[in-house]
Image (tube, coloured by chain):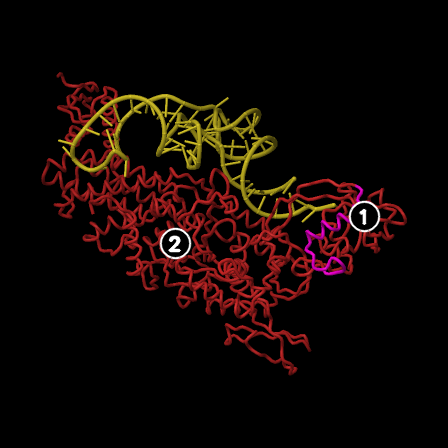
RNA sequence: GGGCCUGUGGUUCAGUGGUAGAACGUCUGCUUCACGUGCAGAAGGUCCGCGGUUCAAUUCCGCGCAGGCCCACCA
């Protein structure tokens, strides 16, 4: 100790020591109620990003606090299968999964993950995330696969999972079905063309942005209330360029105001088309392949966007376009790759959710949301659901769906529980009819597994922690996926909520804008760790209200670093002056000492309540204000005289106060800045305190009865001190300049035995009785 | 179009039914004895606008305006 504070050296030292000594290892025998955390398993992606750093830091504050008031189960996992992982591996290894043998690609994924995962996790450790890294899972490991497949089988048996051939949301880039939750908006420029359909020799105008779907047109809708078009109902319309006829049908959904009031229905332009075609039992014309290319005639193999151009120019050539204008509209794209989605009828597996919306909202209500308004986002999402949860993906690297189909009798054969985990591609099964069954090739979407993280985490410790867990921490962007799906699974499997509390972090923005790689406004946490250290980064993350976005500014990290320096220097001073401290409580405490102990005791309780309420920012502010101003600027100045010049009880009283006040400050700060507080604790307090690490020490409590007189004395004392300081500043003299002080009789009486302290800290030559007055002595 | 969030000194943000706070920035001053990465002091705000409830509104309610996020709109 007692040198310059070197965060790099110190943070690395304690990170390694915590790990070696297993300070954060879960111990089911430890006393106290277990606070269990359904830790978010980050998607393996090479590097931690700033949003991770922000939200994991926020959850770690709560968890480190909880550890000081009880027992904690804080596992750690990585989410490393499914589309995001496939895309990562494709990028890292410059391959395409669909152009490789399935087995080879899976092996490449597993091997690559082995290479990169430990480096990836290291970022979390560097940030000081106090998880039990031994309680580790990967969402593709054997145990997770088993739990995930078991869940599939259970839900299938309960009739909550079904398979259906249905036009579903399809990504032509990733060539798989995806779920509603994976859609994103994207603003796109487009041409809005009014085309000439024909009906009984007359032009029938229909506007569209998707002329390439003309060959998939199956009907034309008009509104029965539309006087202009009513007479057309029941007749046929001829599709321009392709010259086939489709029925004109009355349907209320045709908006009289929109476009020309006439609407073409294609298989499939959007969700509306899917519903319309089902409603009228029309026969779809499927013109798209799975890779988004057209499948017929001279357009064979041409991708949608290219085909659109060709068809438009052909329409133009034949003068079939009445009118055309450029518009900008919003289209749905796949969140993983930004590709416009299509609707393709494929056979997929779904979890029933649409008929349980009400129940799912009720479940959400039973959970305590921090902040509360985040529940609304959940509720809105559930209310707006239009599809059952599509869980199958036409990909390779995921948890296999543990079923076989018999082509002869159309039966589904489920894997037995004791075979799990199983890859149906590797195991032959016979149907009872005797025929060899076909293995299911599709895999489960990654959310189908990560929605089981409470079960997976619990299984790591022989299910010693039950569902519901105490807390799910996560960011708000995945309420509609991770939070929602976990609530679904927990309801279906356990008829329970997955956790009692959910805390939701905001985003990190830069100049008010969301950070994103494409915008190029990304700040990397690794660079912050390098320059300012984990404690400073955490201190920054502790400054924002839970759920609110935080606007990144480098100056906030400088503020954090300054706080750490101050904490270091103050501790240095205190410890230096505790060399001859006898560890005993003096028989009688000086009044000012009692005043500070009383304050720190109150602070400890307040901060405890704030942490309990997830109000980290307020807790940080309270500790900071007390530490910097009450403790450093005032108290340390006041007791310097007694420390330097006195002996015996007067000094011991100050030493006792210094010891307990500093230790308390360190403990209160320790959830936020774990490294520096551990360093100071280990350097001095460890010798006298029982606990091996400050992070497993008890939350400080004081056996102090609040004394109003002492509080008033303290306030008066500080008021006088401030007046003296102001006087000296205005006179432009040093704060150490000697003065003569005059104080009213009443107040002198109140100050009583603290007069000596007052005299010393104001450097008063004498304190006289009389109307309040400050004077510089005559030269 | 619907839902939610935000709007407070130059900047970033706390906060409260009764004189408005912090950090940074700015200005002035102060260095033997933890820290000048410090200490002391100061300047700086019709708390987005308009209504309503109230003895009292920056705070509660309603309506606007502005920004953000999510959803819907893709004829």
Furthest toward the left, the residue is A647
| Circle nearer the N terminus (2, 1) | 2
Circle 2 residue: A123
Mark in front: 2 vs 1: 2
Q: In this view, does A457 lie above or below B44?
A: below
The range drawn in magenta is A295-322
Q: Is residue A478 magenta?
A: no
As helix, strand or loop, the secondary structure at mark 2 comes to helix
Chain in red colour: A
User: Which class describes the residues within 10 Å of circle 1: few (<14), some (14-19), or many (20+)?
Assistant: many
* Residue at (49% x, 46% y) in the render: A372
Furthest toward the top, the residue is A778
| Percent position of residue A86, x then y | 52, 61
| Percent position of residue A137, x then y | 43, 64
Most foreground residue, A264 or A310 = A310
* Residue at (36% x, 42% y) in the render: A619
């Amino acid at each position: 100790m007692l040198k310059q504070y070197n965060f790099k050296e110190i943070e690395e030292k304690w990170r390694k020591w915590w790990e070696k000594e297993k300070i954060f290892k879960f111990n089911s025998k430890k006393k106290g109620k277990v606070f269990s955390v359904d830790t978010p398993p980050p998607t393996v992606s090479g590097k931690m990003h700033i949003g991770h750093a922000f939200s994991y830091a926020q959850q770690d504050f709560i968890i480190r606090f909880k550890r000081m008031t009880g027992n904690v189960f804080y596992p750690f996992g990585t989410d490393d299968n499914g589309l995001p992982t496939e895309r990562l591996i494709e990028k890292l290894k410059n391959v395409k999964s669909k152009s490789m043998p399935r087995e080879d690609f899976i092996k490449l994924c597993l091997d690559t993950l082995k290479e990169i995962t430990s480096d990836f996790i290291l970022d979390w450790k560097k940030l000081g995330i106090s998880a039990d890294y031994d309680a580790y899972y990967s969402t593709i490991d054997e145990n997770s696969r088993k739990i995930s497949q078991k869940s599939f089988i259970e839900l299938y048996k309960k009739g909550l999972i079904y398979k259906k051939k249905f036009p579903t949301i399809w990504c032509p880039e990733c060539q798989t079905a995806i779920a509603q939750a994976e859609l994103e908006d994207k603003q796109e420029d487009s041409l809005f063309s009014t085309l000439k359909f024909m009906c009984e020799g007359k032009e029938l105008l229909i506007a569209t942005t998707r002329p390439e779907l003309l060959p998939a047109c199956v009907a034309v809708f008009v509104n029965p209330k539309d006087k202009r078009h009513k007479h057309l109902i029941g007749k046929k319309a001829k599709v321009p360029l392709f010259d086939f006829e489709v029925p004109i049908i009355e349907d209320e959904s045709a908006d009289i105001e929109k476009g020309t009031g006439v609407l073409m229905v294609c298989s499939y332009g959007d969700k509306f088309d899917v519903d319309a075609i089902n409603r009228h039992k029309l026969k779809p014309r499927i013109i798209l392949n799975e890779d988004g290319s057209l499948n017929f005639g001279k357009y064979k193999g041409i991708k949608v966007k290219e085909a659109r151009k060709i068809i438009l120019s052909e329409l133009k050539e034949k003068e079939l376009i009445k009118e055309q204008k450029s518009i900008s509209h919003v289209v749905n794209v796949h969140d993983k790759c930004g590709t416009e989605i299509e609707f393709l009828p494929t056979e997929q597996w779904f979890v029933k959710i649409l008929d349980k919306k009400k129940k799912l909202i009720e479940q959400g209500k039973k959970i305590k949301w921090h902040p509360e308004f985040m529940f609304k986002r959940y509720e809105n999402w559930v209310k707006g659901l239009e599809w059952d949860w599509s869980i199958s993906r036409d990909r390779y690297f995921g948890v296999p769906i543990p079923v076989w189909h018999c082509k002869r009798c159309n039966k589904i054969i489920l894997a037995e529980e004791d075979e799990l985990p199983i890859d149906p591609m590797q195991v032959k099964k016979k149907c009872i009819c005797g025929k060899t069954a076909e293995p299911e090739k599709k895999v489960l979407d990654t959310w189908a597994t990560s929605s089981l993280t409470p079960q997976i985490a619990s299984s790591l410790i022989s299910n010693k922690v039950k569902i519901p867990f105490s807390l799910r921490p996560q960011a708000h962007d995945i309420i509609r996926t991770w939070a929602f799906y976990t609530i679904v699974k927990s309801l279906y499997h356990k008829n329970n909520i997955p956790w009692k509390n959910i805390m939701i972090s905001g985003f990190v923005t830069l100049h008010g804008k969301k950070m994103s790689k494409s915008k190029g406004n990304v700040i990397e946490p690794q660079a912050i760790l390098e320059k300012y250290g984990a404690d400073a980064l955490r201190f920054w993350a502790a400054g924002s209200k839970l759920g609110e976005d935080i606007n990144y500014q480098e100056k906030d990290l400088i503020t954090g670093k300054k706080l750490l320096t101050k904490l270091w220097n103050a501790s240095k001073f205190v410890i230096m002056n505790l060399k001859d401290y006898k560890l005993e409580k003096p028989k009688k405490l000086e009044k000012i000492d009692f005043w500070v102990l009383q304050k720190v005791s109150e602070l400890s309780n307040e901060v405890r309540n704030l942490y309990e309420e997830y109000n980290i920012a307020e807790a940080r502010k309270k500790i900071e204000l007390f530490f910097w101003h009450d403790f450093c600027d005032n108290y340390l100045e006041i007791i310097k005289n007694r420390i330097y010049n006195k002996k015996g009880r007067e000094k011991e009283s100050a030493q006792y106060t210094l010891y307990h006040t500093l230790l308390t400050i360190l403990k209160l700060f320790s959830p936020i800045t774990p490294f520096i507080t551990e360093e100071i604790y280990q350097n001095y307090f460890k010798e006298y305190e029982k606990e091996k690490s400050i992070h497993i020490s008890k939350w400080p409590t004081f056996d102090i009865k609040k004394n109003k007189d002492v509080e008033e004395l303290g306030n008066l004392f500080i008021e006088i001190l401030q007046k003296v300081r102001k006087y000296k500043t205005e006179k432009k003299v040093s704060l150490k300049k000697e003065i003569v002080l005059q104080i009213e009789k009443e107040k002198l009486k109140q100050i009583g035995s603290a007069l000596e302290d007052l005299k010393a800290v104001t450097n008063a030559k004498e304190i006289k009785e009389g109307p309040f007055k400050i004077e510089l002595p005559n030269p």
